[in-house]
Image (cartoon, grey):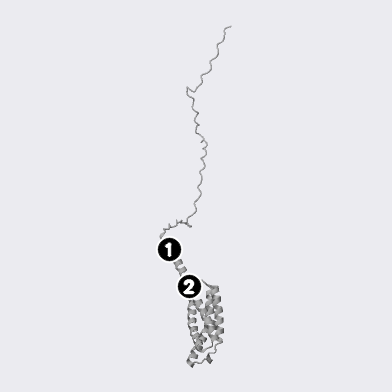
Amino acid sequence: MNGLLGQLEATSKSTQGDLVKLRIEHWKADNATKKQALSNVDSIQRNLQGALPEIITQLRAAPEDVPATFKLYRNLDALYDVLGSVVEGVGAFGSKDDLQSLSNDLTTFEGTRKQLAERIETLSTGKEAEIVRLRTALKTAQATPVEPPKKIVVDDNEPPKKPAVKKKPAAAKPATPGTTTPAPAKPSAAQQTPPAQAAPTKPQ
């Protein structure tokens, strides 16, 4: 695109120079023909100096912009038609040198217009493919079930829980005065040990 725009800018300058060289007032034609030719030349000059540079700047900033590309194409289409009318007048009433120069300019504009038409087709095809891909991805995403996220409810007003209090073991109560302490249980007969028998003494 940068090369195409650079070529278009060069053709624009060349065309403006060639139009300035025309001596339409010297043509051997009626006044209506001369007036129409002068009006066409003025229209082309205003376009080449104003509208065309603005469109080129926009397209250079966004080379993939389809609307901007089409806008340039339409502008060139209009330029080609008006310039073609001027070239016809030059061929009928002007010099051969002027005719050759403007014919070359017209041919270059036509070539640029064809390149833009091809580029518009390429960009449009690419954009259409991208739209189809995005639509397919969207349908796939819509068909895939999505699990709802688990909700965790946090109650900021809930009072903090008190820590559990450990119970202390109850201490043994001291004996109350006037009460008797139970005597320890006596061992049973089986638990009692018989007294040792004394050894018999010998007679003297």
Relative image position of residue 173 (x, y in whole percent): 51, 38
- Amino acid identity at mark 2: Glu
Is 132 situated left or right of 195 in this image? Answer: left
Is 19 situated left or right of 142 in this image? Answer: right
Image quadrant in which you'd find residue 11: bottom right
Kindly report the distance in space between the C-alpha atoms of the residues bearing marks 1 and 2. 27 Å
Q: Residue furthest left?
A: 143
- Secondary structure at badge 1 equals helix
Location of mark 2 (residue):
118
**Is residue 68 shown above or below 186?**
below
Q: Nearer the viewer, residue 139 or 174?
A: 139
Give yes or no for contact between labels 1 and 2 (Cβ–Cβ under 8 Å): no
Residue 7 in sight in this render: yes
Location of mark 1 (residue):
136
Mark 1 or mark 2, whichever is nearer to me: 2
Q: Nearer the viewer, residue 57 or 156?
A: 57
- Amino acid identity at mark 1: Thr
Q: Nearer the viewer, residue 85 or 125?
A: 85
Mark with earlier residue (1, 2): 2
Relative image position of residue 101 (x, y in whole percent): 54, 83
Q: Nearer the viewer, residue 198 or 99?
A: 99
**Is residue 204 shown above or below 22?**
above
The residue positioned 54% from the left and 86% from the top of the image is: 96
Relative image position of residue 113 (x, y in whole percent): 49, 77
The residue positioned 42% from the left and 61% from the top of the image is: 140
Q: Residue furthest top?
A: 204
Relative image position of residue 170 (x, y in whole percent): 51, 40
Q: Report how many numbered discs are placed on residues in the image.
A: 2
Q: Which of the numbered marks, if any, corresponds to residue 114?
A: none
